[in-house]
Amino acid sequence: QVQLVESGGGVVQAGGSLRLSCAASGRTFSSYAMGWFRQAPGKEREFVAAISWTGGNTAYADSVKGRFTISRDNAKNTVYLQMNSLVPEDTAVYHCARQRRANTLVSVSSYEYEYWGQGTQVTVSP
């Protein structure tokens, strides 16, 4: 069973930065693309960023492009989301997720992700 545990959330003022981490259990972490999604109160869950199993390919939502950076350290079974220039609209619970199939291209669809973490709250004050 794969377990994903997020950390690094918190309260920050607009314009500030946070770095989220997602630690994964299991020995096959390096074979799977990973993604970050977020869900704000009363809104649908939305894609934020994804990274391929090698780390060589990434994808971002238009709303975060240029401000957020996804990365991974396969030796540590960890994926990161560096968030800069935060705005109040970034306030949400952030979840990391592992794609369903190994060695595939990154996906922006939540249906392609099988395992999900519990999430970490990010709150950006004006």
Image: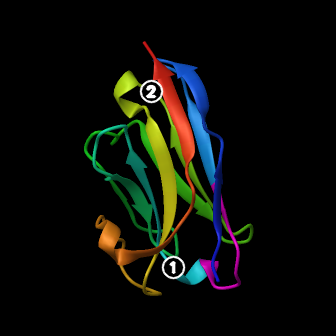
Circle on res. 32: 1
Q: Residues within 10 Å of mark 1 (few under 14, many from 20)?
A: many
State whether residue 12 is above or below residue 69: above
**Secondary structure under badge 1?**
loop
State whether residue 41 is above or below residue 28: above
In the image, residue 24 lies in the stretch drawn in magenta: yes
Q: Residue at x 34, y 40 (%)?
A: 64
Q: Give the residue furthest to the right.
A: 76
**Where's residue 100, x and y in %?**
43, 82
Circle on res. 2: none
Q: Could you tell me which quadrant the C terminus lies in?
A: top left
The quadrant where residue 30 appears: bottom right
Q: Which residue is mark 2?
A: 86
- How far is the residue under mark 1 from the one under mark 2? 28 Å
Q: Which residues are magenta?
A: 22-29
**Secondary structure under badge 2?**
loop
Q: Residue at x 51, y 68 (%)?
A: 55
**Where's residue 75, x and y in %?**
73, 71
Front residue of this view, candidates 110 and 84: 110
The quadrant where residue 40 appears: top left
